[in-house]
Amino acid sequence: MLDVQIKKQLFHYDLEVDFSVGNEKVILFGPSGSGKTTILDSIAGLNKPDSGKICLGNNLFFDQKQWMPTRVRNVGYLFQDYALFPHMTVEKNIYYGIRKKEQNSAIEKILDVLRIHHLWTKFPHQISGGEKQRVALARALATEPSVLLLDEPLSALDKQTRTECQDEILRIHEFWKIPFIIVTHDMDEAEKLGNKIIFLEEGKIIKTTTV
Ligand SMILES: Nc1ncnc2c1ncn2[C@@H]1O[C@H](COP(=O)(O)OP(=O)(O)OP(=O)(O)O)[C@@H](O)[C@H]1O
């Protein structure tokens, strides 16, 4: 279980949220600037809350006394713009940050589930938006994370590719069964992907619904 309690003073309001995520898919839904990325960044260790507590099972990521560095949190993060390295092939992008290349059995499974074997030697500019999304997802999963954060993972895609990638996210979750936190602005997508939807407004949870 991932437990998140965060307080942080932002430019225009105070972010203050308290929620838990089991091995399920939780959606963060809210207008631009409502604090969604700040919450993901806090879980990943890219942003430090003013107070609160974040823990994954017995692993304490953050509290008043402790700050666990990003690299040891074992959190997978798919950024809004995928952030693939343009000068690296798909293979290098996926293996980036993994130490024991040959011993990583997870990679083969990921490549099968996402169907991206054939892109191995291509560079990001040689592949489509949907393929980039799948490569970025593979990279986020290659480290075998204990939590996966997805910040508007599908917003740049056309409708058909988007539907395909939604199905892939559902399949990946079936397979991995770890906490997924997904940010989206699209209610249909939220209802398709989420087990639970957390509605945010100006840094506060105004409603939570179970799908
Ligand atoms: N370093 C900072 N210090 C204080 N406030 C900040 C800082 N960075 C961003 N903010 C403010 O925090 C608020 C939340 O931003 P955040 O990016 O988390 O929102 P969001 O819901 O992810 O928005 P979007 O949907 O547009 O990506 C914004 O009002 C922003 O101005």
Image: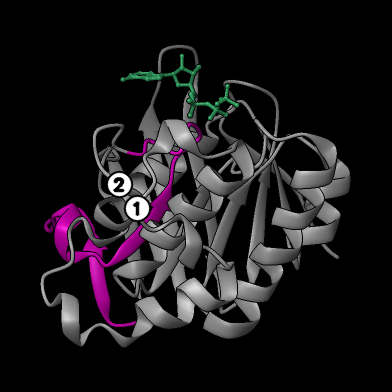
> Which residue in the structure is indicated by mark 1?
121
Badge 1, how many Cα within 10 Å: few under 14, some, many 20+?
few
Q: Residue 127 appears at what percent x and percent y?
A: 52, 40
Tell whether 95 sits left or right of 119.
Answer: left
Cα separation between marks 2 and 1: 6 Å
Q: Earlier in the sequence, mark 2 or mark 1?
A: 2
Three-letter amino acid code of the residue under disc 2: Thr
**Residue at screen point 70% across, 25% down:** 31
Q: Which mark is residue 181?
A: none
Residue 201 visible in the displayed image = yes
Three-letter amino acid code of the residue under disc 1: Thr
Q: Are marks 2 and 1 in contact (CB under 8 Å)?
A: yes
Tell whether 186 sits left or right of 123.
Answer: right
Q: Residue 193 appears at what percent x and percent y?
A: 76, 60
Tell whether 74 sits left or right of 106.
Answer: left
The question of residue 75 being in magenta is answered with yes
**Residue closer to the observer: 175 or 201:** 175
Q: Which mark is residue 89?
A: 2
Say above or below: 203 vs 121: above
Dominant secondary-structure state across the stretch colored magenta: loop
Stretch of the chain drawn in magenta: 57-84
